[in-house]
Amino acid sequence: MDRIPILKMGPFLLVTIQVDLYDRLALTLENDLISMVSQTGAKGVLIDISAVTIVDSFMGRILGNIASMSRIMDAETVVVGMQPAVAITLVELGLTLQGVYTALDVEKGMDLLYNKIGIIDVLEEDDQEEEPDDCND
Amino acid sequence: MDRIPILKMGPFLLVTIQVDLYDRLALTLENDLISMVSQTGAKGVLIDISAVTIVDSFMGRILGNIASMSRIMDAETVVVGMQPAVAITLVELGLTLQGVYTALDVEKGMDLLYNKIGIIDVLEEDDQEEEPDDCND
């Protein structure tokens, strides 16, 4: 497969990286993602890297690029499912993923985005009906 | 990467197939998926094959197997994002994906699952408040 599929889920786009990102594939992903953001008006981009076991500075830069591009297009980026070893490697490489939000899994990532963009997650709100904190001004 | 990641999204599991399914990978996916269904109590499985351009009888059988296994575990399976050429090939191969629901994209697939398992999609319901059809017995 010569391109990574981008799934639209409500106001967000979801990308699951399962293959090693080579130059051409990474550039295609960047282009496709930015086009999708402008086409769909997505407010957030979720990038799942739970299948990524080996990370290098190239991958780190691509993630940073996508986040920067998305922000210019008014969409926040959240990287989810990062494996501990990958996090260690990224820091050892000196890549702290500036401007990239991270979350443990897709669900937490979506909650983070919902909070960032100020959309109230209806399901979440439903669960928290009893909480008086909701009544604060 | 030697396994395909399975993402939990609310009551559903999402799998995006981006690589050719070889025997071992397919078996790993089947095992992982069934384990996840039993662990998470997921009520539905979404399999996105929008990146799949070439399909053979093996892939067709794997999709059928996953659907059958999931149903036994009380979870429905929806295959989403199938490309027209793939649909043509499947039928020409005589594979009509018995017992596998299909939808055009992930969002439509989720709506289908919400209807199948009788969960009312809160967001959907919100949009359809004016429709009197909702009042039918």
Image (spheres, coloured by chain):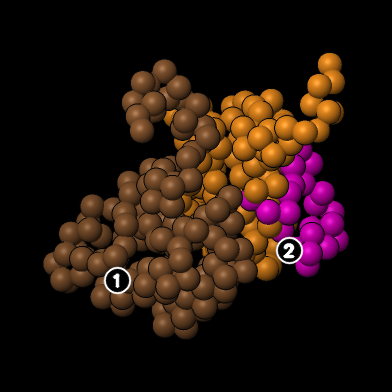
Chain colours: A brown, B orange
Q: Relative to the observer, which residue lies in front, B68 or A35?
A: A35
Q: Does the segment drawn in magenta span residue B119?
A: no
Q: Is residue A85 visible?
A: yes
Q: Circle 1: is it few (<14), some (14-19), or many (20+) Cα within 10 Å?
A: some
Looking at the picture, how far across and down is residue B14, in whole percent?
54, 46
Residue B112 disc label: none
Q: Relative to the observer, which residue lies in front, B120 or B65?
A: B120
**Residue that sits furthest to the front in the current view:** A137
Looking at the picture, how far across and down is residue A86, in whole percent?
25, 60
Q: Secondary structure at mark 2?
A: loop
Q: Which residue is mark 2?
A: B83
Q: Is residue A74 above or below residue B70?
A: below
Q: Does the segment drawn in magenta span residue B103?
A: yes
**In the figure, residue A95 lies in which quadrant?**
bottom left
How far apart in space, not on screen, are marks 2 and 1 (Cα)? 32 Å
**In the figure, residue B133 lies in which quadrant?**
top right
Looking at the picture, how far across and down is residue A10, in whole percent?
58, 50
Q: Which residue is mark 1?
A: A60
Residue A92 placement, left or right of A34? left
Residue at 26%, 66% in the rendered image: A97
